[in-house]
Image (spheres, rainbow, N blue to C red):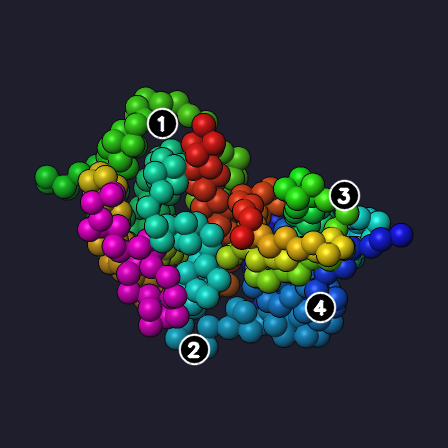
Amino acid sequence: MAVCPVCNAKFDSGDYYTMATHFINLAEDSDAYHVQWINRNISRKKMDITQFTSAIENFYNIAHGGIKEWIINKFVEQFRGENPHPFILKMQSYSKPVMMGYAIEHYFFLKQWVKSCSIIISKTDLDDVQRYEIENILSEYYGRGRKKPHIELLLEMGEELGMDRVQIFATEPLDSTKFAISRWKEITNSCNWICIMAAMHSLELVANSKLNNYGAKYDYFNPGMLDSPLVPDSVKKFLGEGYKSDYSHSFRALDIIAKYCHDYNMEGIQDAYLMSAYAFDRYLEARMERGEMFENQ
Amino acid sequence: MKCLKTNNENGCALCDATWGEYYREIENEKMFFCCNICADIFENMVNAVKKETGWDHIDSVELHGNYSKGRNCTATSGNNTFRYYFRTYSDGRMMEFKKL
């Protein structure tokens, strides 16, 4: 089954003609979110149905490099390429309000994250998958030995920036975060383990420091921040930890997906990724929006 | 009647995309946009320029950039010129607007 990453409309597997028709019809109606997706992922230049069907086929083509490279290439292009996500640009210099926004919205992201990881465990008997997810949950949510979990580093960052953690827990996430979480819930409830894995762990590519060979033009954040006396220690600890761990987290997950993908519907895995990346795009905007709210206070 | 012109002559007045079929009258000009969000962004931008400059009308806007990095623009009104940068959220709300 193929799925429209914008509105979740479903099409028969490989039926790119019907999917193309769906996009063209909605573009003719000037549906903003479909037009935006086409402009950013296919072309800003109008095409006829034959050209568009061919473009969609190319978009899904994994002949070069398989599913791992396809996901990395798509992610890099959308978030860290020539025209990166605006949040990545914001992270090229230290901004206290942006990091405060990050602390609040990301708390809710991590609450959903751990649910998604645990549901992956519940949906498979494969040892390497379960082990990977348990390790991920430990590092993100529980901690390992003396190492604090990512969520604790996030909350400590929020506290050093002047927020109480109780205030963070009690804050209502912004609409874009709510939208993203509801989509991740939907993916987690309705998809098999490998699709959930593609949807969630591909997002860790955002902080992967080894993406230059895939065309990344920007680091997740300016690495100079880790040495800057102007940046609080808790921010350095939080960003530094993700910078170190998300490299192995994201590549290991994609290796697992590549190992088992041939037993599953490839298009389903691609669609789960696209649905999640679309939500992630909106969620990153929420971090900026929350930051702007602090800036205007 | 004075009308507003942009350098995006082939498609959407904001992003130059040729998809869509959305029109809105802004500054006495029936302008083509690929979607209502681009129209909202353009209209908000025009209002921000008029507020910043005190102009009662804009003759032209030249836009360079995109949704990711924002847009560097030059607006004219008669003999006056105003250069600025702006960026929006994907739903069209203004994120940043500054005079250059």
Looking at numbered disc 2 in the image, what kind of residue is underneath it? His
Q: What subunit carries mark 2?
A: A
Q: Residues within 10 Å of mark 2 (few under 14, many from 20)?
A: few
On-image quarter of the N terminus of chain A:
bottom right
**Residue B19 visible somewhere in the drawing:** no
Looking at numbered disc 4 in the image, what kind of residue is underneath it? Lys
Q: Tag count in the figure?
A: 4
Q: What subunit carries mark 4?
A: A
**Mark number, residue A46:** 4
Which secondary structure, mark 1?
helix
Tell me what residue is drawn at x 39 percent, y 66 percent. A217
x and y percent of residue A91 in the render?
Answer: 37, 50
- Pointers 1 and 3 in contact (C-beta within 8 Å): no
**Mark number, residue A64:** 2
Q: Do the dots labelled 3 and 4 sit on one chain? A: no
Depth check, front residue: A115 or A109: A109
Give the residues in magenta: A208-231
x and y percent of residue A185 in the render?
Answer: 46, 40
* Mark 1 vs mark 2, CA separation in Å: 44 Å
Res A224 quadrant in image: bottom left
* Mark 2 vs mark 4, CA separation in Å: 27 Å
Looking at numbered disc 1 in the image, what kind of residue is underneath it? Ile
**Mark number, residue A168:** 1
The residue wearing badge 3 is B56
On-image quarter of the C terminus of chain A:
top left
Q: Do the dots labelled 4 and 1 sit on one chain? A: yes
Depth check, front residue: A123 or A176: A176
